[in-house]
Image (tube, coloured by chain):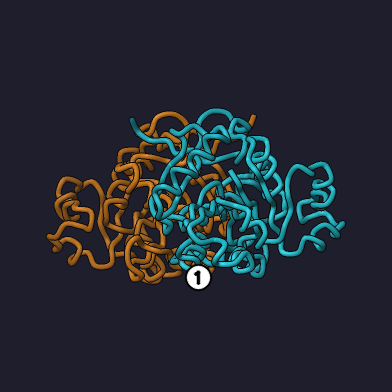
Chain colours: A orange, B cyan
């Protein structure tokens, strides 16, 4: 499938690499290709700059947001959540029309100090904001409740644990679940919470996720919903 | 131990009954004893009125918030979260001084429609609000992420699953953990997230909890944090 991965950070790199390894035709989208390739600083987590990673990945295309959206039937939103809507405007409404956006970003707001808060939150969510702003895009929120290496390799955490999914379009959710299964998620561990407003629930898992990361001293954990038989 | 349970709803009843069965000297606190006993309507979930339950429970004392706080060395906050601070003012600052409050309430706000939102949220929490308002009360947030029957009987959901704890006072958390253990929580399944600001994380689990309740058609489930070995 022709897929665009919006965002050049570690999440975008990890998703793009996995999709490429599965045989998809992948283009990474960024705001300004020349600037992205010129950056030599590590990211906030100490990862090397995109350009270094990209040297080894000439099999993955790179374009601006508009070129990536034009390329794709399906897009992954791996931007920093608070910049997602701006990135999608640059991609162009017409280039998004009727396509599926798998939204794995979280609207982490660092302006209120650490740990980050969320914006939007509570009576709104990033997933809903994107859906409302681009009504003809089919937004599916998923994978946003875990570390990116776990997203594409659930066996990094042993046993059963869950990935949530939210969205208004049943066919788009079915296609997103197919991708989750190709990432080795067991269908039984995918929990469809309902329409896109349920993204409020998964985005608001981030505050405890961040605290658990500090507490457990590892990002390699996940939520498992256990229920009475 | 002399314990006050603030709140006469199904959560307060369940906690009071469990504490009484463990041999504690329990007083339930309510705003107005006469009014509470006079109510004949079922609650929002279809449970019978407090007075009917209380007929069988003459071994549990009943008083107003002030009497309950005066009675107790340790208090459970089982009020509707948005009324918790008002209830504690009625209990009286002097009667709370130096005591432990196990805060199991959530600030569910029904004024924005269903499902409820949270108020406060994001850069604040109910746990922090109570701690800030009553600095000499030792607030421990715990048990607020599950159904009340599960709080006092974790084996209702098989296998391992977690209860979170947040608070500024280490001794108060140790005492709260002793109570959790008396409710049959395994110490390994208690996750101490840190200070009271981490209550933001557990209170913000409510939005997905409510959606999961709808999805799973049962409240008898819980979160288990699974991690790589």
Q: For mark 1, what is the residue?
A: A133
Crowd band around label 1 with a 10 angstrom C-alpha radius: few (<14), some (14–19), many (20+):
few
- In this view, the residue in front, A74 or A155, is A155
Q: Residue at x 30, y 42 (%)?
A: A218
Q: Residue at x 43, y 51 (%)?
A: A208
Q: How many marks?
A: 1
The answer to whether residue B152 is visible is yes
Q: Position of residue A16 (x, y in %)?
A: 31, 48
* For residue B38, side relative to residue B78 (left or right): right
- In this view, the residue in front, B69 or B9, is B69
- In this view, the residue in front, B208 or B34, is B34
Mark 1: secondary structure:
helix
Q: Position of residue A67 (x, y in %)?
A: 32, 63
The answer to whether residue A135 is visible is no
Q: Position of residue B182 (x, y in %)?
A: 55, 34
Of the 4 image quadrants, the one containing the C terminus of chain A is top right
- The answer to whether B196 is drawn above or below residue B123 in the figure is above
């Amino acid at each position: 499938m022709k897929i665009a991965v919006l965002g050049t950070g570690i999440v975008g790199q990890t998703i793009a690499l996995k999709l490429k390894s599965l045989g998809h035709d992948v283009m990474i989208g960024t705001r300004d290709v020349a600037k992205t390739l010129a950056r030599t600083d590590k990211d906030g987590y100490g990862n090397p700059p995109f350009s270094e990673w990209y040297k080894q990945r000439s099999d993955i295309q790179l374009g601006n947001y508009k070129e990536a959206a034009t390329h794709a039937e399906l897009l992954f939103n791996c931007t920093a959540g608070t910049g997602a809507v701006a990135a999608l405007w640059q991609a162009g409404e017409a280039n998004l029309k009727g396509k599926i956006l798998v939204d794995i970003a979280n609207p982490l707001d660092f302006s209120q100090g650490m740990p980050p808060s969320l914006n939007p939150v509570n009576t709104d969510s990033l997933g809903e904001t994107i859906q409302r702003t681009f009504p003809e895009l089919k937004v599916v929120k998923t994978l946003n409740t875990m570390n990116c290496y776990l997203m594409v390799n659930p066996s990094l955490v042993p046993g059963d644990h869950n990935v949530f999914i939210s969205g208004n379009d049943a066919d788009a959710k079915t296609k997103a679940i197919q991708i989750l299964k190709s990432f080795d998620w067991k269908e039984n561990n995918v929990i469809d919470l309902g329409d896109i407003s349920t993204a409020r629930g998964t985005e608001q898992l981030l505050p405890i996720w961040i605290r658990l990361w500090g507490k457990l001293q590892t990002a390699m954990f996940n939520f498992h919903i256990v229920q009475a038989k």
